[in-house]
Image: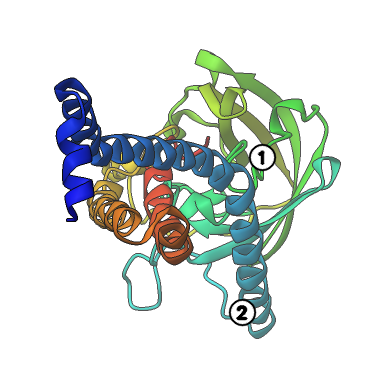
Amino acid sequence: MSLTQTAREESRPTGEVSSLDSGARTRPTVVLAGASLCIAAALLLGFVINLAVLGSLTQHRDQKVAFDALRVQLAKGTAAVSPKGVDGRLLPLGTPMAILSIPSLGVKQVVFEGTTSRVLTHGPGHQRSSVLPGQAGSSVVMARRAAFGGPFAGLPNIRKGARIQTTTGQGAATYTVVNVLEGARAATGTADLPENRLTLITAGGLPFVASGVVRVEAVLQGTPQPAPPAAIADSALPAAEAALAGDSSAWVGLVFWLQALILASVGVIWLWLRWGRRQAWVITVPVVLLLAMCAMNQAALLLPNVL
């Protein structure tokens, strides 16, 4: 330090020097608060975008992949006709089981095995304690109302008499809608449902604000296909497969990704202070976005499965 600089420092009022020192000491705190608010706002916005937009894109991709695979299985006669495989074990959750079409709503979706929140991110799910569509007995299919493509977005507006078509390894079946229930009246156990019917379930209330469920009942037209023995009872189904249930197993993944995101955020702040704001964001934004998307996907699984 030169003599001139020393003289200038000594000539400053004591209060001014203290103020400058205090500002220098609080600068990292201000940066931390600002960066934290920016990250929190970005996460909230990203969570909504993930549910409404990105989730829809991934769901459409999953549907295309599953449709191509199931079409080949149907052509070869190897498509599953029971919740159990040839080895006698329950099929893995997410196995493509059927094709569901509702012409009046413009719906054509592959139905997967299971109704957990994770399965329903790919499309409609078949409740494992029920028979497959077209079989003798009561078949239950659940799907999301708004998030991840919202396959059943129009279900509350379906009219009595509308046709529902299904295709499984046993062939095609046609159902006719006979009842549309919403709210408390829709909360009926599978064991209480009539025989030879297909029941579709989704969230009631406003989109993204689940309030009860919507249940559509459709009666089978024609002779049902034989159904195998029940693979699992209603009472044996995990809680995560009930309507409006979340997937508590997602907490493990969520905690992991949040920890990684926190570490990345600390890295952003460190680079911000060391290299500058612009350089820090250019380097770390891709990493933060990737970690944030992984965390948001896990958080979405905690929400109601038919949301």
Disc 1 target residue:
152
Specify few, some or many for label 2: CA neighbours under 10 Å numbering under 14, 14-19, or 20 or more: some
* Vertical relation: 91 (above or below) 261: below
User: Label 1 amino acid?
Assistant: Phe
The residue depicted at 64 percent of the width and 42 percent of the height is 150
The residue depicted at 65 percent of the width and 31 percent of the height is 216
Label disc, if present, on residue 73 of the rendered structure:
2
Horizontal arrangement in the rendering, residue 153 relative to residue 80 (left or right): right
Horizontal arrangement in the rendering, residue 211 relative to residue 277 (left or right): right
Q: Secondary structure at mark 2?
A: helix
Q: Is residue 143 visible?
A: no
Horizontal arrangement in the rendering, residue 267 relative to residue 299 (left or right): left
Query: Where does residue 260 sit, x and y in percent of width and height?
Result: 26, 57
User: Label 2 amino acid?
Assistant: Gln
Query: Where does residue 2 sit, x and y in percent of width and height?
Result: 19, 55
Horizontal arrangement in the rendering, residue 189 relative to residue 76 (left or right): left
How many angstroms separate mark 1 from mark 2 (CA)?
A: 25 Å
The residue depicted at 73 percent of the width and 28 percent of the height is 178
- Which quarter shows the N terminus? bottom left
Give whichever of discs 1 and 2 has the lower sequence position.
2
Choose between 165 and 253: the one closer to the eye.
253
Query: Where does residue 137 sit, x and y in percent of width and height?
Result: 54, 45
